[in-house]
Image (spheres, grey):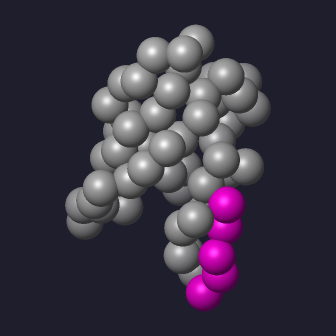
Amino acid sequence: MVWRDGGVFELQTALDPATGAAWTINSLYGTNNLDQMVGVGVLNGQSHAVLLTPLPQ
């Protein structure tokens, strides 16, 4: 889950449907001043490091 703009969002549902649908985000480890998040996700049964960048609003 992610806290943003005064609300809590399920991160998995916030992924882009075209590029993120096959991913499962397992954990997040940190954020930077650009609100990018680093963590671990699974794609096709294999774990990968991920960098998630929010779209501008």
- Is residue 49 positioned above or below 43 on the image? below
| Front in this rendered view, residue 50 or 36 | 50
The residues colored magenta run: 6-10
The answer, for residue 34, to whether it is visible in the render is: no
- Residue drawn at x 46%, y 34% as measured from the top left: 41
Q: Residue furthest bottom?
A: 6
Q: Would you say the magenta stretch is mainly helix, strand or loop?
A: strand
Percent across and percent down for residue 24 are 59, 35
Q: The C terminus lies in which quarter of the figure? A: bottom right
Q: Is residue 39 above or below residue 11?
A: above
Q: Is residue 46 visible?
A: yes
9 vs 48, nearest the viewer: 48
- Residue in the image at 32% along x and 31% along y: 49
In which quarter of the view is residue 23 placed? top right
Which quadrant would the N terminus be assigned to in this image? Answer: bottom right
Q: In the image, residue 30 lies at what x, y percent?
A: 28, 59
Counting the numbered discs, the total is 0
Q: Residue furthest top?
A: 44
Give the image location of residue 8, x and y in percent: 64, 76
Q: Residue at x 60, y 87 (%)?
A: 6
**In the figure, is residue 30 to the left or right of 50?**
left
Left or right of residue 34: residue 3: right
Q: Position of residue 39 (x, y in %)?
A: 35, 44
Along the horizontal axis of the image, is 47 left or right of 57? left
Residue at image x 67%, y 22%?
22
Q: Is residue 45 magenta?
A: no
